[in-house]
Amino acid sequence: MSDLFDSAPRKKKYVAIAGNIGAGKSSLTEILSEYFGWEAYFERVDDNPYLTDFYNDMRRWSFNLQVFFLSSRFKHQQRIENMEGSVVQDRSIYEDAEIFARNLHQMDLMSPRDYENYVELFSIMTSYLKPPTLLVYLKASVPTLVNHIQSRGRDYESTIRIDYLERLQGHYEDWISSYDLGPKMIIDVDELDFVNNDADRRDVLNRIESRLFGLFPDE
Ligand SMILES: Nc1ncnc2c1ncn2[C@@H]1O[C@H](COP(=O)(O)OP(=O)(O)OP(=O)(O)O)[C@@H](O)[C@H]1O
Ligand SMILES: Nc1nc(=O)c2ncn([C@H]3C[C@H](O)[C@@H](CO)O3)c2[nH]1
C-alpha cells in the first residue's frame, strides 16, 4: 500500500503560512522547507528599507512600506508560479491588503487617497496570481504573540502596542473565516511549541502532510 502511495507522482505544492506578527510563520516555513526539501520564500525583513522608520512614525511611512511589501511579495509570487518544484511561503500576499493596509487605513494612519491607490494596485497585481494549494493559518492569542515578539527581541518592534496587535488579530479572524480562494487549515499554536518541542513539531508536520498527501487531499 505505502509503496504504491509513495510512488504516485506528486503534484507541485504551494503552501503559504499566514498569521499575525510573531505567530511563528518564519519558523514553520523553515521547518517545512527542511522537512519536505522545498524552496522557502521569506518576507523581506532584515533588509527592509522602511520597517524601522514605519514603527517610529506609522502615518508617514505606511504607504511606502505597503508598496514595498507588495512589490517584493509579487516578485516572489512570480518566481513561485514559474518554478517546477514545490514551495513554502512565509505570509501570503493577501495579508498585506486584507490585514495590514486595511488596519492602517482604519486607524487613520493611511489617508483615504493613499489607501484607494494601494487597493487599486493590489487588485490589479493579485488578479494575475494563483492562490496557494494550501493556506495554513497559525492562530495565536495576543499574549502568545507578545511572548514570541519579546523572545525574538527585534529592536524596532519594541514600539508595537498591544492594541495594534489586537486590531490585527480582529482582521485576521474576519479574513480567515471568509477566505475562499482555496483550501485552508487552521493550527492553534497557543499550546504548541513546534520550535523547541520535537513531539509538537512532528504533530504539526503530520497534520500538514496528511492534508497535502493523505488519501483525501483537497485536490
Ligand atoms: N509555537 C511556538 N512556540 C514557542 N516559540 C515560538 C513558536 N513559534 C515561534 N516561536 C518563537 O517566536 C519568535 C517569533 O517567531 P517567528 O519569527 O517564526 O514569527 P513570525 O510569525 O514569522 O513573525 P513575523 O510576523 O514578525 O514575521 C521566534 O523567536 C520563534 O523562535
Ligand atoms: N505594516 C505592515 N504591512 C505589511 O504588509 C507587513 N508585513 C509584515 N509586516 C511587519 C510585521 C513585522 O513587524 C515584520 C515582519 O513580519 O514586518 C508588515 N507591516
Image: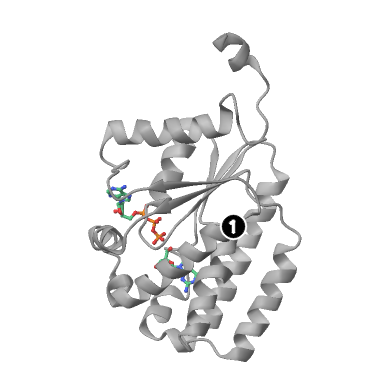
Percent x, y for residue 145?
Answer: 31, 61
Against 4, residue 128 (above or below) is below
Q: Pointer 1: what residue? A: 179
Q: Residues within 10 Å of mark 1 (few under 14, many from 20)?
A: few
In percent of the image, x 56 and y 90: which residue is there? 111
Q: Is residue 51 left or right of residue 77?
A: left
Percent x, y for residue 180?
Answer: 63, 54
The three-letter code of the residue at mark 1 reads Tyr
In percent of the image, x 62 and y 11: which residue is there? 4
Q: Is residue 48 left or right of residue 74?
A: left
In percent of the image, x 70 and y 48: which residue is there? 81
For the question of whether residue 160 can be seen, the reply is: no
Percent x, y for residue 49?
Answer: 48, 73
Q: In which quarter of the image is the N terminus?
A: top right
Against 42, residue 6 (above or below) is above
Q: Nearer the viewer, residue 3 or 89?
A: 3
For the question of whether residue 75 can be seen, the reply is: yes
